[in-house]
Amino acid sequence: MKGDRLKHIVSISLGTPHRDFSIRIKIANRELLLVRIGVNGNLHRAAQLIAELDGHVDAIGLGGINLNYRVNGLSYPCPEGKWLASHSRHTPVVDGSGVKEKLEPLLVQTLAYQFGWTMAGKQALVVSVLDRPDLASALSLHGCRLMIGDAAFGLKLPVWFSSMRTFSWAAYFTMPLLRHLPIRWLYPLGGKQMEHENRFAAQYDQADIIAGDFHFIRRYIPSNLAGKRVITSTLTAGDISFLRERGVTWVASASPLIHGRTFGANVLEAAMIACGLAETDIPPYIQQLKPED
């Protein structure tokens, strides 16, 4: 049957090629070929690849950039993301926002009710609410006190927000302008994803839960995260060991662990669209880390 054929999904990432992969997997009895191609922050190369893949693969994911920034029910288009997606006329292009909207709140619920994570009164550092508003909202609904890091992590400004309400007001007045900033000013691309800066140690120290994009988390991560719990995505086996070495006790992702890695939200959403997968078909990755693991 045509619906049972191998589905080909390609993620075009603005990140480093060192994290590229080509993996054939099976999820919910669907056969998939997942491929990641990193372009080291080169938007024109990404656009060229998308145009070449258009009509030849089942779905394309965009890694390292959003099509829209979302907060409090409002959507602010990202011009560079929209420009990249416009190079595909036939193949769907997704950025992972559907996975972040649907699966990550379910992940928080699972952590609270099935794995016994105590969240009421805990401090949750969310590195970017614009990237993951539904994850931040879910943590808040379960009683977490938020530290919202968009201004600090993205703009390098010493400004932190403690509620979705306050952040939403700030976004309402600033995003019509800020959405036009080049993504390279806001997010580590290419080789910068492997660089490290000593910032925000106090915020990491105060947090019980650290949530959001792994490259943001990793870029400013301190050497000691003893007792911390991390909710993120796009993890390799090396990344998991990296977190374990710093004392992280739990790590969770909305993506399953396959071939030693969890996939980015854009890869997972592209796979779900190409194969007609439902939320219940995607088991999360939740692991209590131990030194001997």
Image (cartoon, rainbow, N blue to C red):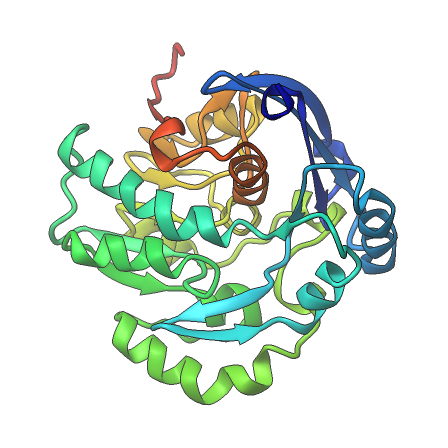
Which residue, as the protein is rendered here, is positioned at the far bottom?
Answer: 173
Task: Please state the horizontal and vertical placement of residue 126, each as a whole percent of the image.
Answer: 37, 56
Q: Is residue 104 left or right of residue 273?
A: left
Quadrant of the rendering where the N terminus is positioned: top right
| Residue 183 appears in the figure | no
Foreground residue, 16 or 266? 266
Count of number-bearing discs? 0
Q: Residue at x 75, y 61 (%)?
A: 84
At which x and y percent is residue 195?
Answer: 67, 47
Please indicate whether residue 74 sits to the left or right of residue 80 in the image: left
Q: On the rendered structure, is 141 left or right of 45?
A: left
User: Where does residue 9 sit, x and y in percent of width and height?
Assistant: 67, 34
- Please tell me whether residue 27 is drawn above or below residue 247 in the rendered image: above
Q: Residue at x 26, y 46 (%)?
A: 208
Q: Is residue 82 above or below residue 247?
A: below
Residue 51 is situated, as x and y percent measured from the top left of the image, at 84, 52
Q: Quadrant of the C terminus?
A: top left
Q: Is residue 173 above or below residue 262?
A: below
Foreground of the two, 58 or 114 = 58
Outermost residue on the front side: it is 1
Q: Tell me which residue sits at (48%, 72%) in the image.
A: 151
Q: Can residue 244 be seen in the rendering of this structure? A: yes
Residue found farthest to the top? 292
